[in-house]
Amino acid sequence: MNQAQPIALDTSRALNLYDLTQPELVELMKRWGQPAFRAKQVWTQLYRNLAPSFDAMTDLPAALRERLKAEAQLGVLQLTREQTADDGDTRKVLWQLPDGNVLESVLMLYPDRATICISTQSGCAMGCVFCATGRMGLLRNLTPGQIVEQVLYFARGLRNNTFDATSRHDHITNLVFMGMGEPFANYERWWASVERLHDPQGFNLGARNLTVSTVGLVPGIRRLANEKLPINLAISLHAPNDELRSALMPVNKKYPIAELMAATREYIELTHRRVSFEYVLLQGQNDEVEHAEQLADLIQGMLCHVNLIPWNPVLGAPLQRSHRKRIQQFQQVLLERGIGCTVRMERGVAIAAACGQLAAVPQST
Ligand code: SAH
Ligand code: SF4
């Protein structure tokens, strides 16, 4: 029997190789009596060759492949449903974790980029009233390996051209952590996945092509400001005053707007990077001209951009998307105040793959 000390995060079952850092893999190979260069070979297979199985790692000795097969896993996510929309340019995948909990990821192909939207948790504890994931509650934090696996699936499909789509791409150009969950509520594991995906000897995704979206967890914003990798930050604001924001987003009671803005200003000062504010427009709730003016007062002069998001329907939520005219008016106010502002193009509404529609239960029939 193998008496070795477990080194993966989830030690209850076979080791998920994607959970290991490079030093941990070096350690494992050493413990298995392999020569030093073996870890590099395996790493290359995992993150450069995107090997779909241990058998595909043909440069490894057969005995090592057998041992890996017996004692390790190449990912633990089980693909349970895959849906496409927009002529194949939007692809949503539902995954099951070994414990039965679920999560989703989405690929969105555009003429000039291939963007993936990745989950960091199964469900979410934050309870925003407009969000399908918020209604699930938090089921599980994902491990770094489980976050990375979602990415590798799409990377493989693009490289091998197995997705039927109108736009042709052979690699992922952009990654947004805007799927299920609040990344900063699972900070260490989420950040480990960022490092793994960025690693120039591995998957090599540029930090500037990564964006994290947060509900506004102030400690996470402060932490990110001090990280070395310059990834992009998006902040879900959604309301320009505390009363309204607390009604839509319970987290505002803990981190009210003044505190959130102070942390954001510090972040900008420290990193000199532009932040995005996300603002979901809900008819009759937060979409009046007066709200746009308040928002402009709040952020004027900051190095920022506003992303207006027409609300995507969530089954059972007593809310409505703002009318197109309201959206235009809102945008106009911000533009006139000199604030960069775009309306987010929607994708995959028909398969509930759009922002905030990701949830275990089908959102449409
Ligand atoms: N938890 C993080 C990231 C995931 S949500 C966050 O809240 O920022 C990604 C974005 O989708 C957030 O800006 C979120 O507010 C928005 N969103 C949630 N539900 C939505 C819905 N039904 N329609 C449009 N956007 C939604
Ligand atoms: Fe969680 Fe983000 Fe949804 Fe709020 S919007 S419930 S933080 S996933």
Image (tube, rainbow, N blue to C red):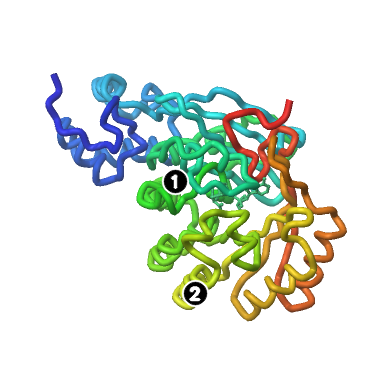
Name the residue nearer the viewer: 200 or 241: 241
Mark 1 or mark 2, earlier in chain = 1
Residue annotated with mark 2 = 262
- How many neighbours does mark 2 have within 10 angstroms: few (below 14), some (14-19), or many (20 or more)? few
Foreground residue among 157 and 338: 338
Q: CA distance from mark 1 to mark 2?
A: 35 Å
- Compared with residue 325, is residue 92 higher up or lower down, i.e. above or below? above
**Hey, what amino acid is under mark 1?**
Phe
Residue 299, relative to residue 140: is it above or below? below
Q: Residue at x 62, y 54 (%)?
A: 248
Q: Which residue is mark 1?
A: 203
Where, quadrant-wise, is the N terminus in this rendering? Answer: top left
Residue lying farthest bottom?
A: 301
Write the residue at 71% across / 70% down: 340
50 versus 111 height, above or below: above
Instruction: Tell me which residue sits at (45%, 64%) in the image.
Output: 218
- Is 172 on the left or on the right of 230, as rendered? right
Secondary structure found at label 2: helix
Quarter of the picture holding the C terminus: top right
